[in-house]
Image: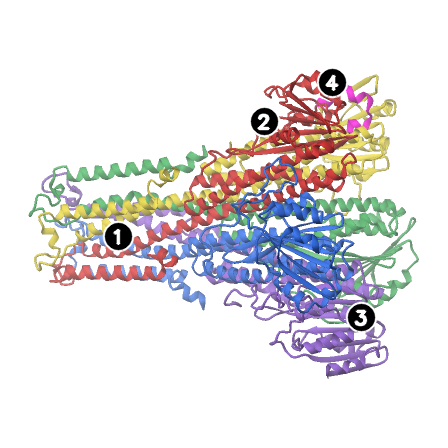
Chain colours: A red, B blue, C purple, D green, E yellow
């Protein structure tokens, strides 16, 4: 069950802000280690769907404006040139583009003229939580998505586009944007299921056999919960903003669907808060469990020590070397006929009395009695 | 009093979202293990009441629009076909229908055109809390309810419909919807009563004889409280929305009654919060109780050990084998006439002094003294 | 100082809702054990005051509308007939009447047409808190009050009506309603004073001599605080609503006075929250106190055991029976001239060193030193 | 550093409400032990300033309305007659006057016609916090202040009035009211400074040498914080109300200054909350410190006992009296030539091994090692 | 890793308010120890940029109004004369100027006529957090900044002004003000990174080897977090106000940028809250870790004591001196042929049984077993 070896996660190794303080706002800070961008487009309308998996950035301009909906997806953020070119083509704001490159940005929604800019975050639960930022620019007839690396949770959408294009046919780019956001949000459900099971296992471990590693796992879980909350909360927030005050470019039908995505975000938030409350009580639970065990240890020590200490004292008495020859009062018991058996009897009586006393207190055999 | 054997409840075994992420929104995910739907209708107006317990879905269309109020109740969610047919008849939104099938959904209220869609949750307290989702579609002259399985808390309503139709006669479908919601809400009161008694028993157990199982029950109770709160809070919320901003289809008289249902929800929320606060303090209470007991154990050990250790030391002194023949200073006490009695006296004095010391500290017989 | 024997109070023995779930809303659930109603009226205007202590319900209609202000007070809720009759006379709403009979209802304010319906709660502090519900119907020229049992905190108002009718003369029924609500609110002040003293005593007991009963009292106090808060909070709330949005039937002068009652409720709420915060810290305080004591116990054990264990070991060494005749290396000390005195000296030195060590650590006589 | 001897402060000895419940609202409850009122006036305008330190109440009417600004200050609340007379002169509302006499009232702001009524509270930190209530009636051309006793924090204002009347000349009574409120608010800064130092000392004491008295001081500090917060919060509140919704009688320039006073109140609130959070963590800190110490005590006991118990056992073995004459197997070691030295060697080896074991565990000399 | 020697930081040594209570509002309280002001100006427009590093205050008037944007920077607050002169030149409000001199003021935003007054705070993390207040007066064509001492985080801005004046050319003073505020805000990111690493190290230290110094560091970290929050929260607040309700002097383009700065502040706030939550759980973590260790200590003591105490008792038995000559029942074992070996065997069996018992309980070698 141990799923971590060291408390991680909370503390990023990456710089929190890739741009040094005081830089020109809108500076494009391309991480030299980031994956090279790989561009693919899907264009469709009521009647056709054209897909091109691997494009050069310069080719995109040919597609622009020719289809009812154009979806340009960029996997990998490692080439500034691509961003400059796309920025010109789609008229992207420098600040928005800075945020796209700034991975681990807080999810948010911005309105630039008639363009909607959304930062959201996909969740995955491998050994630990992993997040991948996905940024969307939504125009009247295009959706532009940026992801940190290839591989995402959007394949079901592509599949639906290709096969049963049902609603896509009649809806525009706004509906495509909704499906992407909805898929990202719904991707949290399996994460939460897995997380619930981990919490359960952890709780049981705390109660059954708490070790010093358990408390590490507890701490890591708390960090995960905080990170999860910090990730889902702003998504819930911008969905709430979209529902309360939908952008004019969104059709009414898409708004109804957006409300559904918002409902899901609320539900995830609810679960996250419940799990967080549970996980924040685990340190106390651990303390209780440890105290309980310490109590057991103390009882064993006390019972054994308390029974034998008086007996050893008696044995010590009759191990004294008082000279019984100089006085009849010096350890006369040593010369009694029944001296030794009597001494043993006294010891046995004392021991029995103490055992009885401890049984009454429930310190011996108590665990059985208490279970009944 | 032990009512659980293992921490349960918080962590569902069922999938949190039955639809895989990225599916078409509005996908009907019928659980193959769900009960087959059983449909019954009650139709009534000022003058008549007709009831049909077991109907085929196709027969419903005959009833539609012919009576002032039609109540169609579907028990069991295990047949997609029924939902498709009902969806056409009553013009249900695909997203709403998806939510109906998605059991364990968060209670909520949605307005679709002139149709009100309500998800609420019945509570029962067997060994543990159990919830059953009940979904309502309320139109101008019909109420359509979906339940997970047969058996519900609505029989008193059916009874009232049949016998003393008082208010039902003059009110429309809105009033029927209110009575259903009200019955669901009021069903939480007996649950809370039972829960209060369990809390009381648990508290007393913590104070009287805390075991390692007690802390398990505490943890389970906390989970129950969180689940209960997560269930009642959104119901309170949508009732508040209904009161603040009633739908136009609700008559003013029904609104007054709805305010009453809201009052009840507020009161339940109040109690849930009180119980939750109590239950969240139980881990601390347990710790206090355990510490108290450990203190008692320590006192016994300390008293016994502290009294006998010096005595044993004295016995050890006179058990030494210094040769009193080579020197008058080697253990001369051994050859004294009153040596042994004197040694015993010294021991008795020391023991008495220590007993007195501990009595003063309240470590011996303290429990009696303190009670006075 | 012990004022409870068993944790009580939180958990009512009475049913939380006297009406079974699913009943017709507005059902009159008369508790068969409730006291029989006793009706009294006071009618007054600028020039006269007429009082009748014991009336039959049918007689009230004679008084109705004949005086500027009519106060009908009903003590005891045990006769459904009385409620039906009063309901007809004063045109009371069925839901309001259900709430009157539903003792332990949450305090609240409802507006029915031109009638104001108020549920409030009187507090008393005997051994434990006790509450009595008092319900008011306020019309333009009457105030109708229902109480659970005879005996209330309204006698000063009756006295003022009889003797120095000052403001009553010129004000109407709204002012009478205000004085009743104000008297109820002000009745919490003595309760809080008494409670403050109990808290103080409890805190001192925790610090001076914490026992397992103390923690019971702590728990009971927390329950009391929660109950107190649950009682005063909704009263503060509806007074706030009255101040922000006064009913048209309230004269401006009465509104000024109502603001004063609201001020008092705010102040009581303030105190309750302060006391609650204090009481919620008491478990921690108890733990600290217990830990402190355990520390003391441990120190005593450690000091005694640590001093005597090495000494006993030395005594054990010279109690060994190595044969000094077969070898000059076998326990030669036993045959030294100063053997025994030397052994005692060594022991004394070791003991002194340890005592010094513990003194330095502050474990012996530390309590005195620390106080300096 | 000990600044209290007993937990005090939270629990007033004075009645919370000097007027018994059910009294006529506006009852003047003069405390018979209160100081007799001492009245002084300062009247000023752009050109003159007249001051009269000790006046009879009847003389005030001569001053009324004759100067642009009249400041009447009443020290001591012990004479009902004075209040009745002032009430007539300045047209004070009975409820406001009741609040003036009701010391320990919650700070608040009320608007009576064109008169502003303010209750505020001066803070002082002697051994413990002390509060003095100061009530202001602010009219268009007068300020009437009531204080519990002579001596206040307003002398700097008087000084400024007399000497460098700068802004006073051109501003009216509103500005004078502002300066008084501002001086009261600013009086909390030195209190908070002193308090910060006390907190620091207390924290250090908890870490260095926690005693059972320390926890008393912690408790007292928490009470102080709660009291402080309860005092400053409503002042912040009414200043906020004054800034958001200034009374028409306040000039725009005074409003700018009032905003400054509000800023100060916010800052004080900020500090109070920080201190409160620190102080509420002190019980936990204390527990940690105590546990740490108990751990040290346990280590000492364990090290000493664990080392000597096996040695004592070995000594016990060779103190047995088995008859080596009847059998060569009975304690042959006793007759070995190197028996005793060998036994000592074995003991030394065991002791050394255990010491090494404990050193490795960091239980011996650990404190030094850990510091490195 | 130890980065503090003593709990510091929370408690200022400086006076919280440099002006004594009751002073004239707007009093200039120049700290005599403050650095002497050093004035520098940068003036620029679309075509030129002029810089002057060290100016006398009187020379500034020559620059005023001659350039599109004038940035006057004052390092050091130690000369009242400079402030008086600047106040006249730029028409600064006395209250604002008082706040400039009042270092450690709460960050805030005030609007004086057409002048914007901003107090913000730069953060640095040396051994401990350090703050430096920076105040801005922003007019239509000038920005006036005051800093406590030379050296700031604004050099990148100066560099950008000189070299690549991109946006500065076309934007006015509002954009310069934005860049300064943005640079200050972004300066918190490296601080938070460093802080995250410290938290991680601290957590690991608590789990690995908690000492009494660790708890001091925990306490210091909590203070730092509180201070950090108190610093960033009001900055977030005034940026939010700027975004919601931008001053008319701010161009729309600057508003877009300001929104970006607000986003950053929100993100910093988010991280601070996460860190704060983590740090506030550290005391509990420490307690768990200490308890865990105490449990280990107790186990060692219990195992050793419990094994040897019965053995020592047996040895004590056979060390008794009962006279076997007077009776065959007096310690006959002593004269058995296999007496001694049998006694040793019995001891070995008992010891083995106890070792087995403790192994089963997991008290011996448990740590290994538990890890599996």
Residue picked out by circle 2 = A151
User: Cβ–Cβ below 8 Å for labels 3 and 2?
Assistant: no
Of B201 and D149, nearer the camera is B201
Give the spatial CA distance, label 2 vs label 4. Answer: 26 Å
Give the spatial CA distance, label 3 vs label 1. Answer: 89 Å
Residue D257 % position (x, y)? 82, 45
- Magenta residues span E155-177
* Element on which disc 4 rests: helix
Q: How many marks?
A: 4
User: Cβ–Cβ below 8 Å for labels 2 and 4?
Assistant: no
Of B194 and A365, nearer the camera is B194
Q: Chain of mark 3?
A: C
Give the spatial CA distance, label 3 vs label 4. Answer: 78 Å
Residues tagged by mark 1 and mark 2 found on one chain of the structure: no
Q: Is residue E283 left or right of residue B115?
A: left
Residue picked out by circle 4 = A62
Residues tagged by mark 3 and mark 4 found on one chain of the structure: no
């Amino acid at each position: 069950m141990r799923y971590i070896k060291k408390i991680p996660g909370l503390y990023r190794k990456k710089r929190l802000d890739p741009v040094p303080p005081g830089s020109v706002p809108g500076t494009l800070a391309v991480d030299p280690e980031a994956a090279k961008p790989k561009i693919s487009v899907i264009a469709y309308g009521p009647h056709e769907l054209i897909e091109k998996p691997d494009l050069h950035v310069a080719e995109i301009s040919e597609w622009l404006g020719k289809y009812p909906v154009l979806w340009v997806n960029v996997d990998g953020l490692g080439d500034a040139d691509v961003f400059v070119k796309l920025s010109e083509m789609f008229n992207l704001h420098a600040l928005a583009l800075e945020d796209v490159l700034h991975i681990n940005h807080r999810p948010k929604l911005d309105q630039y003229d008639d363009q909607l800019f959304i930062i959201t975050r996909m969740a995955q639960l491998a050994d630990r939580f992993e997040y991948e930022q996905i940024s969307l620019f939504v125009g009247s007839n295009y959706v532009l998505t940026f992801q940190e690396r290839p591989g995402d949770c959007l394949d079901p959408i592509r599949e639906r586009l290709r096969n049963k294009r049902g609603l896509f046919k009649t809806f525009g780019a706004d509906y495509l944007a909704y499906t992407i956001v909805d898929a990202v949000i719904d991707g949290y459900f399996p994460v939460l299921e897995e997380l619930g099971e981990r919490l359960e296992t952890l709780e049981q471990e705390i109660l059954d056999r708490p070790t010093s590693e358990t408390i590490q796992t507890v701490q890591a879980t708390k960090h995960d919960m905080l990170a999860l909350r910090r990730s889902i909360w702003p998504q819930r927030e911008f969905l709430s903003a979209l529902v309360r005050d939908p952008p004019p470019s969104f059709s009414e039908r898409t708004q109804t669907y957006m409300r559904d995505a918002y409902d899901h975000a609320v539900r995830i938030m609810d679960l996250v808060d419940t799990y967080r409350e549970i996980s924040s009580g685990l340190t106390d639970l651990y303390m209780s469990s440890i105290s309980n065990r310490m109590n057991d240890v103390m009882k064993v020590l006390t019972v054994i020590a308390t029974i034998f200490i008086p007996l050893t004292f008696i044995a010590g008495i009759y191990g004294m070397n008082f000279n019984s020859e100089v006085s009849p009062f010096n350890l006369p018991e040593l010369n009694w006929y029944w001296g030794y058996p009597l001494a043993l009897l006294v010891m046995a009586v004392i021991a029995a009395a103490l055992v009885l006393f401890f049984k009454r207190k429930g310190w011996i055999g108590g665990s059985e009695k208490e279970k009944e």
